[in-house]
Image: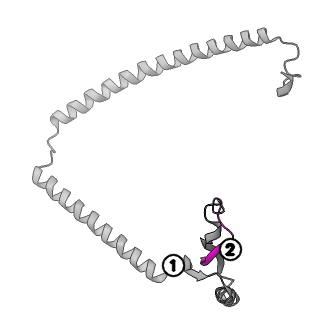
Amino acid sequence: MKERGYDKLFSDITIEELSHKIVRLAKQRDAWQEKAMNMVEKSTHKELELENQRLVQQLEHDETVVPREAYQAMKERYGHEVDNAEYWKAQYRIANDMLQPNKGCGYVFSEIPNDTDGQEFVDTMKKYLNKDSYKMRVRGQHIKPELKGTGATYFGQNLNESTHMRVYIDNK
C-alpha cells in the first residue's frame, strides 16, 4: 500500500479486513441497484402500456390518413429541394474557390539539376521569395548512381546525395 500513498489512510487495517469491507459495500450497492431497477421497471412498464392503449384508440378513431397522391407529391418536392440545395452548395464552392485561390500549393518545381546552375536558381528564388507569407523547402530528388543499393534512401537522402532538386512552396 505504501507505493500508492495510502499508508496513512489505511495503516491500521489489514488487507483482509479491507477486502471484506469492499465485498460488503459491493453487495450493498448491487442490492440497492436491483431495488431501484425493479421500481423503475414496474412503473415504466405500466406507463408504457397505458400510453400504448391510448395511442391505439386514437389511431382507430383518427381519419387523417394521407392519400398516396399527396405523399408522392411531397416526396417529389423533397427530392427537388435536395437537388436545389446540392446545386447551391456547388455554386458556393465554385465562388469560394474563385475568391480564395490556393496559394502555395506545395510541390512547385522538380528536376532542377543539382549543380551550380541549379543552386544559383534556387538561391535566387530564396532571395526574392515573399517570406512573410510563404516558406520554401528544397529537397533532394533521384539518388546518385554510385549510392544506389547502399540504403542511403532508407530514411531520405541528403541534398548532396541527389542528382536533382525539388522545391516546395507552402503557406506560412
Q: Which residue is mark 2?
A: 159
What is the quadrant of residue 76 in the picture? bottom left
Instruction: In this rendered view, identify the residue nearer to me: 102 or 61.
Output: 102
Instruction: In this rendered view, identify the residue nearer to me: 164 or 102.
Output: 164
Q: Amino acid at mark 1?
A: Asn
- Residue 95 falls left or right of residue 112: left
What quarter of the picture does the C terminus occupy?
bottom right
Check the image and report above or below for 50 versus 95. above
Q: Position of residue 88 (x, y in %)?
A: 34, 72
Report the span colored magenta. Answer: 153-172
Check the image and report above or below for 131 versus 24. below
Q: Position of residue 33 (x, y in %)?
A: 55, 18
Instruction: In this rendered view, identify the residue nearer to me: 89 or 168.
Output: 168
Q: Position of residue 5 (x, y in %)?
A: 85, 27
Mark 1 surroundings: few (<14), some (14-19) or many (≥20) residues within 10 A:
few
Badge nearest the viewer, 2 or 1: 2
- Residue 118 falls left or right of residue 71: right
- Residue 63 falls left or right of residue 129: left
What is the quadrant of residue 150 in the picture? bottom right
CA distance for labels 2 and 1: 28 Å
Mark 2 surroundings: few (<14), some (14-19) or many (≥20) residues within 10 A:
some
User: Measuring 31% from the left and 25% from the top, which residue is drawn there?
Assistant: 50
User: Measuring 66% from the left and 84% from the top, which residue is drawn there?
Assistant: 115
Q: SS for tag 1?
A: loop
What quarter of the picture does the N terminus occupy?
top right
Q: Is residue 171 magenta?
A: yes
Q: Which residue is mark 1?
A: 102
Q: Is residue 83 magenta?
A: no
